[in-house]
Image (tube, helix red, strand yellow):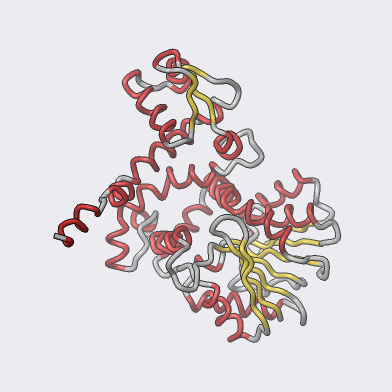
Amino acid sequence: MGEDLSRIELDPSRIMQVGAGFWASKTLLSAVELGLFTLLDTEPLTGAQVGERLGLHPRAIYDFLDTLVALRFLERDGEGSDGRYRNTAETSEFLNRRSPSYIGGILEMFNARLYGFWNDLTEALQTGKPQNEIKLTGQPMFDELYRDPARLEEFMLAMEGISVSNFQALAEKFDFSKYKSVCDIGGASGRLCTVLASRHPHLQCTSFDLPVVTSIAEKTVATAGLTDRIRCISGDCFTDAFPRADVITMGLVLHDWNLERKMQLIQSAYEALPDGGAFVVIENLIDDARRENTFGLMMSLNMLIEFGDGFDYTGSDFTRWCKEVGFRKVEVIPLAGPGSAGIAYK
């Protein structure tokens, strides 16, 4: 009897919620793609007004908007056709393209690229091979991106959107007062350098990346009015020595690569630092027990989709690798959400 009762008490709702998670995901991603949250940032609108301005079919309007209400991405005042839809505080802050805190770039990239690629996760699990553009063209992801400057800049802005809160947290939580210079390896759009230079006026910063990326960083730095304190240098982090600096940073770089490449980058960072210098990685570090940081674990699955042998890692993994190359001490500082900074001291 007790066994039958325990079976009755089991609830499949969480299984169904996760299994149908792509419904909710795609609803949000389509809203971002359509610019819904930017449209609603100026004034509340009726469903008919939203449908007219975004070109939605009448059949879809209310199911779409009311689903977003139920998911708590929109709020609605009133009922039926008289109801008016408006952003929540979160969507106004983070999904309105006019907001300086906009993170929709990464969601746009999820929608345009990763949503379809993740359909082949089972194949990736069975083969260990990437499931992205390389399946169609035979060329690695970054090679494809570097061919199209507009698409590359879109990707860099997406990475900036997912990282900027971590950059800001690092600028506040890490003690930069004892250092004079920072070099960001794989500096992408240059945003980490602008965040650090703005928060710490004594720092001289360098953004280091491939030539095709450097022009993007130069625009970011110029827009921030920091060309006197941030230089953008072109180079290849696997063939060129890193520029010397008191602090070497890497934001969402190390997880792209297999262990051999990871160790090469860590060794290069060690060689570019003076005694007392610090090597900082900003990643979604997986908890050491591999039980809690769901986003970090799924990011590692995403690296399987994107690169095959790239993977995310734990703080203890990072500690072990850094000590192998000679760093004397390693610590992990929580940043924003699932993000953390791994810091190795020479």
Q: Position of residue 126 (x, y in %)?
A: 27, 67
For this view, does 312 lie left or right of residue 160?
A: left
Residue furthest top in the image = 82
Across and down, in percent, residue 205 comes to 77, 61
In depth, the one of 332 and 131 nearer the eye is 332
Viewer-nearest residue: 87 or 203: 87
Residue found 45% across the figure and 68% down from its top: 310
Q: Is residue 2 above or below residue 19?
A: below
| Relative side of 201 to 309, left or right | right
What residue is rendered at 78% in x and 65% in y? 176
Residue 327 vs residue 254, the one in the foreground: 327
Counting from the top left corner in percent of width and height, residue 144 is at 47, 54
242 to the left or right of 140: right
Disc tally is 0
Image height check: is 224 above or below 84?
below
Residue drawn 73% across the image and 53% down it: 195
Q: Residue at x 32, y 50 (%)?
A: 14
Find residue 118 and report its horizontal and vertical position in percent.
Answer: 35, 53
Residue positioned most to the front: 1
Quadrant of residue 98 within the rendered picture: top right
Q: Nearer the viewer, residue 199 or 231?
A: 199
Q: Quadrant of the C terminus?
A: bottom right
